[in-house]
């Protein structure tokens, strides 16, 4: 394995990093003891790239990989470490670490993987609150905020919406936008923000406390990196990199990726995520209901208990849309999310079925071969 550790960085961190300052709490300590992991060291995954990890411990930062037994016993992607995870580690060689186990997670933010049908992908774990970032210009979409909200609520993570780049519009226009978002989304905190003129900074900072973990969700170009710089002041914590060894040969091209967990000046921890153009829905029943609590409340009045709210007689939801009690946008977004969820569930079921029949086929082939040998 190539060494990609900047050791001077390591030393400078040694002095002031404690597990507590990385977000460790009695919750995780309890989980660690319950799992009998007391003999291992503790670290937090701050970056992940193609199966290689960057882990921060009280001793500094290390490149890390998982032990073989963990790899072989993993049944799905969620059994692998993700950014935000607390992990049990041992030192390995001079400056590397081995990850032996994931310490029980507090929260898991996940979405359906882009381009991989039906597979769930963890965005980040152990998040206390998430900031949904949108730019008021080209990216703006209340539907998208609503989808991110559903992802957060499904994970039990409080969402806060940040409407960025307000310097590009007049104050009156920004206020109108804020009113529209509030009317649609109800009791979510919404911050009018700008990286250019300091608008909303105090408001945002009031949401951030030391030793808690936050996450930025939003499409590419909405201003997440700039926002991290605005919040992190001196920008000292963004130097870490993960080196990637060229596949196949063991050497060759060397790609790097940025640290994804940043310590802010006030002590809050922020996880930056890759731009997410497509957000799929996973097991979102709960999130759906929380986001559209009005719809589900009204739906109790539908004549049929299995009403799909798409045209049945006596549908209270459609009635409420017609009366203007539920906005058409909300209703359409609701239907779209239900459809995506159904699609997701059916592709997962399909995959399981295919998985089973493949296993069956392998068995049969083996049998035929054995019979031939006899
Ligand atoms: N006018 C204006 N431009 C901004 C603001 N914040 C960021 N930008 C600009 O928007 C562009 C994208 O900003 P980034 O911070 O790179 O966006 P990002 O969300 O990190 O994008 P990815 O790294 O692709 O995920 C840059 O040109 C920024 O200078 C803002 O508050 N106002
Ligand atoms: Zn109905």
Image: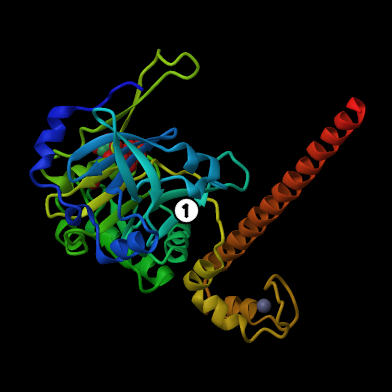
What is the basis of the colouring in this image? rainbow
Is 238 situated left or right of 364 in this image?
left
Q: Residue at x 79, y 37 (%)?
A: 362
Please identify the quarter of the rendering in which residue 63 is found.
Answer: top left
Q: In this view, does 92 lie above or below 16?
A: above
- Dot 1 beta carbon under 8 Å from ligand 1: no
Q: Position of residue 134 (x, y in %)?
A: 35, 51
Please identify the quarter of the rendering in which residue 29 is found.
Answer: bottom left
Q: Which of 130 and 193 is in front in this view?
A: 130
Q: Position of residue 105 (x, y in %)?
A: 39, 59
Q: Residue at x 71, y 50 (%)?
A: 352
Q: Which residue is drawn at 32% across and 65% down?
A: 30
Q: Which of 56 and 137 is in front in this view?
A: 56
**Residue 340 visible, this orientation:** yes
Q: Is residue 209 above or below residue 70?
A: below
Q: In which quarter of the image is ligand 1?
A: top left
Quarter of the image with the N terminus in it: top left
Q: How crowded is mark 1: few (under 14 residues within 10 Å), some or many (20 or more)?
A: many
Quarter of the image with the C terminus in it: top right
Assign a secondary structure to mark 1.
Answer: strand
Q: Position of residue 240 (x, y in %)?
A: 24, 33
Q: Which of 152 and 189 is in front in this view?
A: 152
Which residue in the protein does label 1 denote?
110
Q: In this view, does 310 lie above or below 111?
A: below
């Amino acid at each position: 394995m190539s060494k990609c550790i900047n050791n001077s960085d390591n030393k400078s961190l040694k002095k002031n990093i404690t597990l507590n300052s990385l977000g460790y709490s009695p919750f995780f300590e309890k989980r660690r003891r319950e799992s009998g992991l007391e003999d291992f060291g503790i670290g937090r995954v701050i970056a992940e790239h193609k199966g290689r990890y960057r882990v921060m411990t009280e001793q500094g930062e290390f490149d890390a990989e998982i032990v073989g037994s963990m790899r072989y016993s993993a049944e799905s992607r969620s059994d692998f470490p993700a950014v935000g995870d607390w992990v049990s580690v041992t030192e390995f060689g001079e400056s590397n670490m081995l990850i032996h186990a994931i310490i029980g997670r507090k929260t898991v933010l996940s979405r359906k993987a882009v381009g991989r049908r039906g597979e769930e992908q963890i965005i980040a774990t152990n998040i206390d609150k998430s900031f949904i970032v949108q730019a008021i210009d080209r990216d703006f979409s209340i539907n998208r905020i609503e989808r991110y909200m559903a992802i957060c609520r499904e994970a039990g993570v409080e969402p806060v919406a940040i409407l960025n780049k307000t310097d590009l519009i007049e104050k009156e226009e920004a206020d109108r936008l804020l009113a529209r978002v509030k009317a649609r989304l109800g009791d979510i905190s919404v911050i009018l923000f700008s990286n250019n003129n300091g608008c909303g900074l105090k408001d945002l900072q009031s949401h951030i406390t030391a030793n808690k973990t936050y996450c930025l969700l939003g499409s590419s170009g909405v201003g997440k990196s700039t926002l991290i710089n605005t919040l992190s002041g001196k920008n000292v914590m963004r130097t870490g990199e993960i080196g990637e060894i060229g596949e196949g040969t063991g050497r060759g091209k060397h790609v790097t990726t940025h640290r994804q967990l940043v310590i802010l000046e006030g002590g809050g921890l922020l996880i930056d995520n890759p731009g997410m153009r497509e957000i799929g829905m996973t097991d979102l029943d709960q999130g759906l209901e929380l986001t559209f609590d009005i719809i589900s409340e009204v739906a109790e009045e539908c004549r049929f208990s299995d009403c799909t709210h798409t045209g049945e007689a006596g549908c209270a939801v459609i009635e409420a849309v017609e009366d203007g009690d539920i906005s058409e946008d909300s209703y359409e977004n609701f239907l779209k999310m239900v459809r995506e969820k159904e699609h997701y569930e059916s592709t997962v079921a399909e995959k399981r079925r295919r998985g089973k029949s493949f296993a069956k086929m392998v068995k049969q082939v083996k049998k035929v071969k054995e019979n031939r040998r006899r």
